[in-house]
């Protein structure tokens, strides 16, 4: 045992140990408090800035709506927007270095007829195609799988249509007919794309994602 420690009684050593533990705990508490204070300050600064940017981005999107609606009216009067245009168009500055594009943000949907259509097509595929071409059956069945929201995927349905004329079975024909009739495309709003030309003459995007606003 250390000579210095021998000079103390058991009670004194125990007290020294207790004091040391208290000091260590106090140090840890101070370090924890310092860390948590710094963390909370950082989170507050970041979230405060995020809130400001969120507000500014929301206001900017509204500004884009107003300005592009005005421009659409002027373009329609001037004759540069087709009469069958659905709202999407681009405008470019005279010096051809800045471009703003408004795009339609749509959401495909199918009504209750799609359910019957899927039943008919699956019945046909399982009864006929599966027996003679398992690989094709698997591919076509994959196009009928629904997403997490319980809806058909637009791109998959388009792929299904590519095979429309390959079969004459009434279930296949009627199924595809019902899917077409059940389809609708809802306008969710407009998205915007901003581009500027770099020194190399190529268009560069200014990424501002406010599609969910």
Image (tube, rainbow, N blue to C red):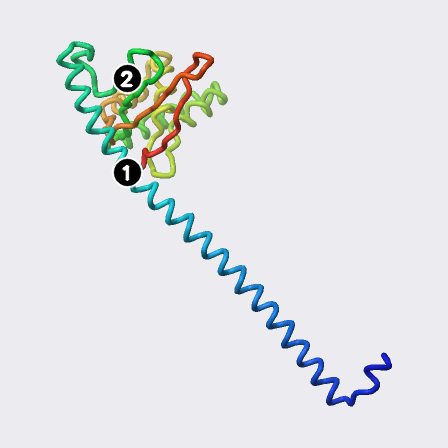
Label 2 crowding class (10 Å Cα cut-off): few <14, some 14-19, many 20+?
some
Quadrant into which the C terminus falls: top left
Image height of 33 relative to 93, above or below: below
Viewer-proximal residue among 153 and 173: 153
Q: Is residue 50 above or below residue 70?
A: below
Quarter of the image with the N terminus is bottom right
Residue bearing mark 1: 58
- Are there few (<14), some (14-19), or many (20+) residues within 10 Å of tag 1? some
Q: Position of residue 112 (x, y in %)?
A: 24, 33
Secondary structure under the numbered disc 1 in the rendered image: helix
Q: Which residue is mark 2?
A: 90
Residue ID at (27%, 34%): 60
Q: Are marks 1 and 2 in contact (CB under 8 Å)?
A: no
Total of numbered circles in the picture?
2
Q: Residue furthest left?
A: 77
At which x and y percent is residue 44?
A: 41, 53
């Amino acid at each position: 045992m250390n000579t210095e420690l021998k000079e103390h009684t058991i009670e004194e050593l125990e007290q020294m140990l207790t004091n040391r533990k208290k000091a260590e705990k106090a140090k840890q508490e101070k370090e924890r408090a310092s860390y948590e204070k710094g963390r909370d300050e950082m989170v507050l600064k970041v979230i405060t800035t995020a809130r400001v940017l969120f507000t500014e981005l929301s206001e900017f999107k509204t500004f884009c709506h107003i300005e592009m609606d005005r421009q659409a009216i002027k373009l329609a009067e001037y004759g540069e927007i087709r009469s069958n245009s659905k709202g999407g168009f681009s405008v470019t500055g005279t010096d051809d270095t800045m471009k703003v594009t408004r795009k339609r943000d749509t959401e495909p949907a199918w009504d209750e007829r799609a359910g019957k259509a899927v039943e008919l097509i699956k019945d046909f595929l399982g009864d006929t195609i599966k027996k003679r071409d398992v690989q094709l059956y698997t591919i076509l069945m994959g196009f009928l799988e629904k997403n997490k929201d319980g809806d058909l995927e637009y791109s998959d349905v388009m792929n299904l249509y590519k095979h429309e004329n390959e079969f004459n079975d009434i279930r296949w024909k009627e199924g595809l007919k019902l899917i077409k009739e059940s389809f609708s495309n809802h306008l969710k709003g407009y998205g915007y794309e901003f581009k500027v030309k770099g020194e190399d003459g190529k268009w560069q995007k200014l990424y501002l994602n406010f599609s969910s606003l």
